[in-house]
Image (spheres, grey):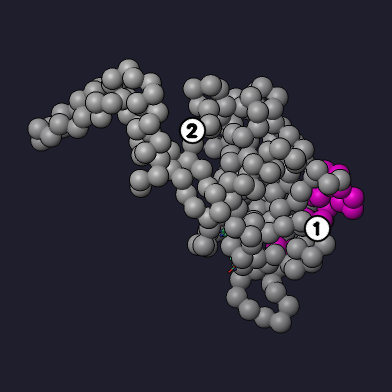
Amino acid sequence: MKIDILTLFPNSFSFLQESIMKRAKESGAVEINIHNIRDKATDKHKTADDRPFGGGPGMLMKFEPIYRSLKSIGVYPERDASTKVLFTSPKGSKWTQSMAQEFSQNIDRLVIICGHYEGVDQRVLDELVDAEISIGDYVLSGGELPAQIIVDSIVRLIPGVLGNEESPIKETEFKDGEVIPEAPQYTRPEIFVTDEGKELKVPDILLSGHHAEIEKWRNQHRSSN
Ligand SMILES: C[S@@+](CC[C@H](N)C(=O)[O-])C[C@H]1O[C@@H](n2cnc3c(N)ncnc32)[C@H](O)[C@@H]1O
């Protein structure tokens, strides 16, 4: 999968240089390019924002630098069905695990435009973007964190990206708005004694070696949160 992120703050993406994302890039499963929208501003001050017509607080991201950025990476004026251009927005459709799954399976090229300031010229949303995506009901300062969350949730589902020890098979699932949590998990030591003398024990069943009983326990505890 090829991913392009358009941003006014290209230094905000250190998360994508670490751990699973780093390995995914190194293995060739994903290519991620970060583009500075300001580079495509045409005036000498490289202006990417301006005041809203009709008045109002704050600044809006301008149409032209985003338009020129999309043209430069070849996703405007045409793009195929396996390419999606998203704009991060608190008023967008809520990003879900099933959307991440759908994108990991059916999308070859993903472009995410990170918003900033008060928002963006409406013509960007009407002409350039396939969907506005929110990562939750709160307002952040910019789309850089949402973009990384969207990318992470997709890339880890691309076959081969997670090693066996990180397999998503037993993960928390989301079905029809219901959360089916993964079972509680423990690692060594079997008993941890706090400085205050409290004993924190691993459930005996997990130490028993009875695989069928362990599976039964896990299934019972998946739905008991
Ligand atoms: C300060 S916010 C703008 C909020 C805008 N005035 C509004 O009320 O909808 C700046 C940018 O951060 C990003 N952003 C903020 N919260 C977000 C969220 N929950 N999901 C996705 N993007 C978000 C968007 O790109 C947004 O354009």
Indicate which disc, 1 or 2, sits on the residue closer to the N terminus: 1
Q: Is residue 105 above or below residue 214?
A: below
* Residue drawn at the location 57% of the way across and 27% of the way down: 162
Mark 1–mark 2 Cα distance, whole angstroms, equals 38 Å
Instruction: Give the magenta part as a residue range.
Output: 61-79
Q: Amino acid at mark 1?
A: Leu
Task: Name the residue that disc number 2 marks.
Answer: 170
- Which quadrant of the frame does ligand 1 lie within? bottom right
Q: Is residue 71 visible?
A: no
- Residue at image position (71%, 37%) is 105
* Location of residue 130 with respect to 214 vertically, above or below: below
Whether residue 108 is visible here, answered yes or no, is: yes
Give the x, y percent position of residue 172: 48, 41
Seen in the picture, residue 95 relative to 219 is either above or below; the reply is: below
Residue appearing at x 24%, y 23% in the figure: 190
Q: Is mark 1 within 8 Å of ligand 1?
A: no
Compared across the picture, whether 187 is left or right of 59 comes to left
